[in-house]
Image (cartoon, rainbow, N blue to C red):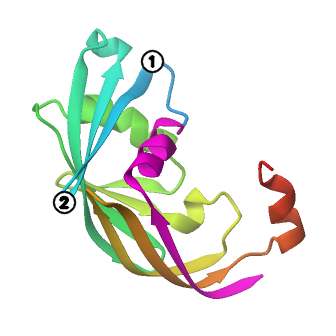
Amino acid sequence: MQIDALSLSLAPREVSALLLSVPLPQGIHLSDVALKDSGLELTVKASFLLNLPVKFRVEVHSHAGSRVSVKVTPPIKPRWLVLRPLIASIPGAMYAGHSIVELDLVSLSKGYLSSVSIQRIVLNRNGLRVDMTGLKSKIGWEEITRKLPW
């Protein structure tokens, strides 16, 4: 399957619901997602931090091909104490230094995509908008529709 161009637009409520549904490592959970003018704010609770809420600001830093870099700004110095287990559990994610986390959409898709090129990505108070080209998959439409929850 190949899609030449695709625009994805998610309202703030959909962005929150999507992020809150992401499975996280045991003992860590996302308790709140708030969209801001230049990104979003995540409230994370971790059992090894006595379940105290820790807020992280996440902003789109850059994108190239299938990779998106986000800047994660924590409020406290031991910032990677919570973030390292999260990053390690996400396929296609890696720490790129100076609070930058790189996500590879092809790896994140777990085989659904074999290539994609991000043309534009905007994450703000209005939601998420991603414009992509060159989406390719070895999976056909029939298999994709079987996996949809309808």
Residue 138 lies within the magenta run = no
Q: In the rendered image, which residue does mark 2 sit on?
A: 38
In percent of width and height, residue 11 lies at: 42, 57
Amino acid at pointer 2: Ser
Q: Is residue 47 above or below residue 129?
A: above
Q: In the rendered image, which residue does mark 1 sit on?
A: 27
Q: Which one is earlier in the sequence, the residue at label 2 or at label 1?
A: 1
Q: Quadrant location of the N terminus?
A: bottom right
Q: Nearer the viewer, mark 2 or mark 1?
A: 2
Q: Is residue 97 left or right of residue 29?
A: left
- What is the quadrant of residue 128 in the picture? bottom left
Report if residue 140 is visible in the image.
no
**Could you tell me how far apart the alpha carbons at marks 2 and 1 are, in whole angstroms?**
29 Å
Give whichever of 43, 72 is nearer the camera: 43
In percent of width and height, residue 7 lies at: 51, 78
* Residue segment shown in magenta: 1-22
Residue 12 lies within the magenta run = yes
Give the secondary structure at mark 1.
loop
